[in-house]
């Protein structure tokens, strides 16, 4: 591979851990895109990279780097309220660098079921906000089969949540419920440090 001085400088910055937010990953070996996804600070490590024309090329495993759980949530319009709460609660660093986690994320429609005054009050109370967020996060990465087998898992808030099945395949109304009232609307969205489920009603912890 031939690099000019500018590219060589970019490689040096990358090796030092200095690289821009929002660059994209492509498979260099075959010189064709494998899968492209935004790459944020802290993800380009333990692999060999080069920078050229503001692109990052991943040389090692020939597989895509997924976004983290938090990046996945924060770039989706349908979870912007929950994302804002995570940011306000000061939990971005923790959820970005640690894991794995299983996130049970309420959608915008779900968060809309909280009265505006109650939501404003929740955002104003740092302790309750942190508890609310952590009550939607389970340490470890669990696929649906594991959650249904265990039935009850403990969240980062230290409180249990339950998983159960309602309906059946025969009647085409089979649903997986969290705490008997929050329906999972999307299953097993995988990320680099965990897995995400989306629900249609927020989980309310014991304060």
Image: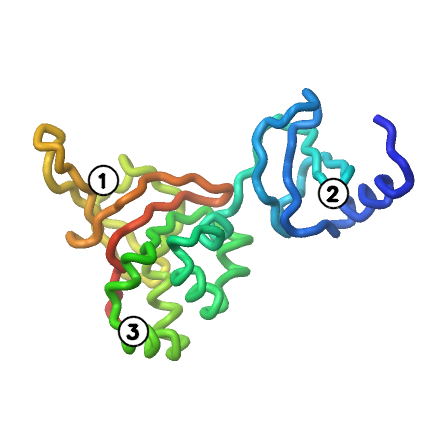
Position of the C terminus by quadrant: bottom left
- The residue under label 3 is 116
Residue 2 in the image: state x and y as whole percent: 87, 28
Query: According to the image, what is the colour scheme of the structure?
Result: rainbow
Give the camera-side residue of 115 and 190: 115
Q: Are marks 1 and 2 in contact (CB under 8 Å)?
A: no
Circle 1 Cα neighbour tier, 10 Å, few/some/many (<14 / 14–19 / ≥20): some
- The residue under label 2 is 54
- Mark 2: secondary structure: loop
Residue 133 in the image: state x and y as whole percent: 37, 63
Residue 126 in the image: state x and y as whole percent: 41, 76
Instruction: Mark 1 or mark 3: name the one nearer the start of the chain.
Output: 3
Instruction: Mark 2 or mark 3: name the one nearer the start of the chain.
Output: 2
Q: Is residue 26 above or below residue 115?
A: above
Q: Is residue 36 above or below residue 152?
A: above
Instruction: Mark 1 or mark 2: name the one nearer the start of the chain.
Output: 2
- The residue under label 1 is 148
Q: Are marks 2 and 3 in contact (CB under 8 Å)?
A: no
Query: Is 11 displayed left or right of 131 in the figure?
Result: right
Figure quadrant of residue 166: top left
- Mark 1: secondary structure: helix
Query: Is 68 displayed left or right of 123 in the figure?
Result: right
How far apart marks 1 and 3 lie (CA) works out to: 33 Å
Circle 3 Cα neighbour tier, 10 Å, few/some/many (<14 / 14–19 / ≥20): few
């Amino acid at each position: 591979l031939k690099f000019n001085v500018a590219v060589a400088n970019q490689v040096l910055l990358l090796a030092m851990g200095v690289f821009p937010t929002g660059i994209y990953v492509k498979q260099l070996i075959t010189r064709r895109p494998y899968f492209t996804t935004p790459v944020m600070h802290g993800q380009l490590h333990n692999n060999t990279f080069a920078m050229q024309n503001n692109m990052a090329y991943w040389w090692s495993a020939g597989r895509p780097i997924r976004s983290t759980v938090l990046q996945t949530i924060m770039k989706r319009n349908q979870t912007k309220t929950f994302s804002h709460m995570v940011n306000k609660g000061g939990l971005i660093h923790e959820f970005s660098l640690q894991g794995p986690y299983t996130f049970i994320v309420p959608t915008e429609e779900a968060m809309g079921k909280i009265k505006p005054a109650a939501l404003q009050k929740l955002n104003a109370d740092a302790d309750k906000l942190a508890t609310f967020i952590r009550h939607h996060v389970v340490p470890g990465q669990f696929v649906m089969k594991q959650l249904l087998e265990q039935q009850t898992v403990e969240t980062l808030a230290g409180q249990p949540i339950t998983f159960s099945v309602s309906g059946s395949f025969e009647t085409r109304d089979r649903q997986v419920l969290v705490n008997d009232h929050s329906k999972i609307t999307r299953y097993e969205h995988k990320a680099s440090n965990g897995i995400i489920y989306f629900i249609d009603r927020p989980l309310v912890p014991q304060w």
